[in-house]
Image (cartoon, rainbow, N blue to C red):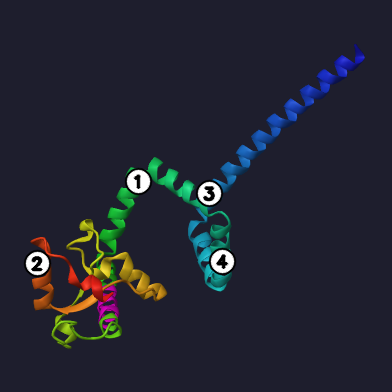
Amino acid sequence: MLAETMHKEVSTQKETDEKLNIELRKKKAEYNKKYRQKHRDELLEHNRKYYQEHKDKLREDAKRYYQDHREEVREYRRKYRQEHKEKFKDYQKNYFQKNREKFRESARRGHLKDLEHYRRFKIEFGGKCVVCGESDLNVLEVHHPDRRVEEKGVSFVQTKEFKRWVNDGIKPRVVLLCSNHHQKLEIAIAHGEPDWTKTLI
């Protein structure tokens, strides 16, 4: 009987302590919320300075964490985007409107970089038409014999093969043709003739 009474008292005390802890956590969370709201600008400035002073370490830590928890992070991001789809759309729309010129300048720089890579690519792959020997880089085009049907009409600089060459130096199976011979070849292929350039690569 005594043991049972003591057990009840201990259980009651645990429940009381747990309720107090919950209440304290709520009060602490409310206090922190009010503090952050009141000192928002100071906290933002502090965080900005801290990031600037520890930028490399924070980036390295974030990179290491992502590598160690890649699948968890991807799954979390996927779920978060699904649950906040409209919020993401509004954010992206507002961000683009506020930074329209920044996006345009970034796109322009990216386009110029792609053009420079494309020019270097033509030089590395012989720098002339395999049929007539035309060497003007401005009229040389890349023919991609293995390109899938769904990739037809897509600029070569947008393909995975080109990106792999830029980033990893992996050469794709392509040949260089001048505009005239490239057009003639595409027309011939469209009429059922075999792609003779496959014998060159």
> Label 3: few (<14), some or many (≥20) within 10 Å?
few
Q: Residue at x 11, y 60 (%)?
A: 192
Q: Which residue is mark 2?
A: 188
> Label 1: few (<14), some or many (≥20) within 10 Å?
few
Image spot of residue 198 (x, y percent): 24, 70
Under circle 1, the secondary element is helix
Q: Which residue is mark 4?
A: 58
Q: Which residue is mark 1?
A: 87
| Residue at mark 4 to residue at mark 2: CA–CA distance | 57 Å
Say whether disc 2 or disc 1 marks the residue closer to the N-terminus. 1
Q: Say if residue 143 shows up in the picture.
A: no
Locate residue 123 relative to residue 8 in the image: left or right. left
> Label 2: few (<14), some or many (≥20) within 10 Å?
few
Q: Residue at x 12, y 64 (%)?
A: 193
Question: At label 4, which amino acid type do we have?
Answer: Leu
Q: Quadrant of the C terminus?
A: bottom left
Image depth: mark 2 or mark 1 in front:
2
Say whether disc 2 or disc 3 marks the residue closer to the N-terminus. 3
| Residue at mark 2 to residue at mark 3: CA–CA distance | 50 Å
Residue 30 placement: quadrant: top right
Q: Which residue is mark 3?
A: 72
Work out whether 196 lies above or below 130: above
